[in-house]
């Protein structure tokens, strides 16, 4: 009788620990790795031929917004297509529990602008068979999954539950009784399996006001108080459990960095700072961030940087675009229905305010934006040309040139904005820090703009194979073992005997990110941009093959990883 359910035979193993690669077989039994070394093919119920292939730990994605999508997409794509076997939901303080039934509509609307998740998809695709956070986790557990899911406790819903939406948005400071109730809710969520907490704390105005609610108001975590964050940090410290994710402003680095250091010190737990990003026109920004992270390490403070290492860029139309909210004039002009947006963007009286200062925060200089999809014969001549070149030809300001084209097309013109971090030298500076995590996939968010969920494949192809910035051994540690350690994914992120069998088997030379596509596969008749991968011969999640030759097997072996491991845990508050 075979000893193993699956034997992966003859592969080159990169086990995630940074030791040199080695040839070995892997025997898998009951969802875990039973043996690594010489394993006879006859000992396997199924044998996977990995000759000439890399065998490595499945990748771990710490920054996603699949809180809604997981209910209709078991693979949480794009992530599931690109070797991700575990993902963290509930980032930035955004989520759907606890939410009272009468507040569900408002909770979904809040995600339509800040994370650009289509309302119709949420409305049709989410079961809403919960009120509390523990009930939400029970619903996630019942839902078929092809990847593992680890949940942050997003603090936005907690603040709304305790303070009410208006008071929370007004930045009302919780009194002692309200802080006690926040503590109770947070402990309840942790007892149910939450892995820590998350918050976006961006300034509601100025150059950091880039992720706002659907009505242009701040998200409630933007105006929450330091003392509330410290309450949550102390609770993690009391339990010696969990980690934190913080998205901060660029308007007050001194305060924000000192505050994050305090949270990490109060809790004794890791804090993940989102996001370390290179701006090619201002390299001092990422260099300063790298120096601060190094200083934290030297002082024994557990702050890690989440690096934006993909060059996916943004494809957008002004029917949906919302990532220039750092400019009040742009924020106001891009609120409302398509018809209202069209009227405002066509209004000559608004143009001076849109021209100065020009937006560039999320995408770099506006002159570099390219017209990729004219929607009418009148604008076809501008296809594949930059706004800067078009403006020079027409003798117009670049903002006027872009908006005149968009208005002529009824806002249906497709533009592409390359990311502001295309310099390989700057990417190398970020990659060279061994404790900066890769990614910021934002999986499940910005579905009509962004395909950053491709980042694991892109890392192996671009960072390792094409430019030799890292060895495969180092890359796999950064893609799996390091995020597993930060997030408390117990036993995952490495290949060792007894570990859960989350494994990617891929053809290194053939691996690639495929061209972008439009997929009409969301609930409610909505569409999204996708990029698939080629070269993943097999992906295994908890010992079952979920991807074979880059296609789903419709095997839903993913688990809800309560506390990072999926098993029950009893902890005193």
Image (tube, grey):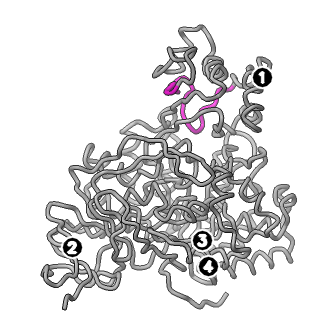
Tell which of 384 and 179 is nearer to you. 384
Give the magenta part as a residue range.
357-373
**Label 3 environment density (alpha carbons within 10 Å; few <14, some 14–19, many ≥20):** some
Q: Distance from label 2 to label 3 (Cα)? A: 43 Å
Tell which of 382 and 522 is nearer to you. 522
Residue at 60%, 8% in the rendered image: 395
Q: Distance from label 1 to label 4 (Cα)? A: 49 Å
Which type of secondary structure does the marked residue at label 4 adopt? helix
Mark 1 vs mark 3: give the one in front: 1
For label 3, the residue is: 265
Q: Position of residue 147 (x, y in %)?
A: 45, 68
Tell which of 502 and 571 is nearer to you. 502
Tell me, yes or no, if residue 283 can be seen here.
Answer: no
**Label 2 environment density (alpha carbons within 10 Å; few <14, some 14–19, many ≥20):** many
Q: Distance from label 1 to label 3 (Cα)? A: 48 Å
For label 1, the residue is: 350
The quarter of the picture where residue 173 lies is bottom right
For label 4, the residue is: 138
């Amino acid at each position: 009788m075979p000893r193993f359910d699956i034997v992966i035979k003859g592969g080159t193993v990169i086990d995630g620990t940074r030791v040199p690669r080695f040839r070995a077989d892997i025997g898998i039994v009951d969802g875990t790795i039973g043996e690594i070394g010489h394993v006879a093919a006859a000992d396997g119920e199924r044998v996977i031929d990995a000759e000439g292939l890399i065998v490595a730990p499945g990748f771990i994605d710490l920054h996603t917004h699949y809180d809604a999508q997981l209910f209709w997409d078991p693979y949480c794509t794009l992530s599931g297509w690109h070797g991700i076997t575990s993902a963290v939901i509930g980032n930035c303080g955004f989520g759907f529990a606890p939410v009272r039934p009468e507040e569900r509509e408002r909770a979904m609307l809040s995600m339509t602008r800040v994370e650009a998740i289509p309302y119709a998809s949420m409305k049709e695709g989410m079961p809403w068979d919960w009120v509390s956070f523990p009930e939400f986790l029970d619903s996630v557990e019942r839902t078929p999954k092809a990847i593992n899911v680890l949940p942050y406790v997003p603090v936005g819903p907690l603040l709304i539950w305790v303070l009410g939406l208006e008071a929370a948005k007004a930045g009302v400071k919780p009194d002692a009784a309200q802080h006690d109730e926040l503590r109770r809710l947070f402990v309840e969520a942790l007892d149910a399996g939450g892995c820590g907490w998350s918050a976006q704390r961006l300034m509601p105005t100025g150059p950091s006001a880039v992720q706002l609610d659907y009505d242009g108001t701040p998200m409630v975590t933007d105006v929450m108080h330091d003392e509330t964050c410290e309450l949550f940090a102390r609770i993690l410290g009391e339990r010696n459990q969990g980690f934190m994710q913080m998205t901060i402003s660029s308007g007050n680095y001194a305060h924000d960095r000192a505050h994050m250091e305090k949270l990490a010190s109060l809790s004794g737990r890791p804090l993940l700072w989102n996001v370390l990003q290179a701006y090619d026109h201002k390299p001092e920004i990422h260099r300063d961030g790298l120096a601060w992270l190094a200083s934290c390490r030297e002082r024994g403070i557990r702050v890690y940087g989440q690096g934006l290492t993909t060059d996916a860029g943004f494809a957008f139309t002004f029917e949906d675009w919302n990532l220039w909210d750092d400019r009040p004039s742009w924020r106001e002009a891009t609120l409302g229905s398509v018809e209202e947006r069209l009227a405002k963007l066509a209004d000559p009286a608004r143009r001076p305010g849109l021209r100065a200062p020009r937006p560039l925060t999320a995408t770099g200089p506006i002159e570099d934006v390219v017209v990729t999809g004219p929607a009418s014969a009148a604008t076809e001549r501008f296809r594949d040309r930059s706004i800067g070149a078009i403006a020079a030809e027409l003798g117009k300001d670049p903002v006027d040139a872009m908006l005149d084209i968009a208005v002529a097309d009824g806002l249906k013109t497709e533009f592409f904005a390359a990311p502001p971090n295309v310099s390989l030298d700057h990417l190398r500076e970020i990659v060279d820090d061994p404790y900066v995590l890769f990614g910021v996939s934002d999986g499940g968010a910005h579905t009509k703009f962004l395909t950053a969920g491709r980042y694991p494949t892109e890392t192996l192809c671009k960072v390792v194979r094409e430019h030799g910035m890292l060895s495969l051994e180092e890359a796999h540690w950064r893609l799996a073992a390091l995020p597993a350690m930060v997030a408390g994914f117990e036993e995952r992120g490495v290949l060792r005997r007894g570990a859960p069998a989350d494994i990617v088997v891929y053809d290194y030379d053939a691996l690639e990110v495929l061209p972008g596509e439009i997929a009409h596969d969301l609930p409610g008749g909505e569409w999204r941009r996708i990029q698939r991968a080629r070269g993943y011969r097999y992906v295994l999640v908890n010992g079952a093959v979920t991807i074979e030759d880059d296609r789903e097997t419709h095997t839903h072996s993913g688990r809800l990883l309560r506390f990072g491991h999926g098993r029950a845990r009893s902890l005193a508050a």
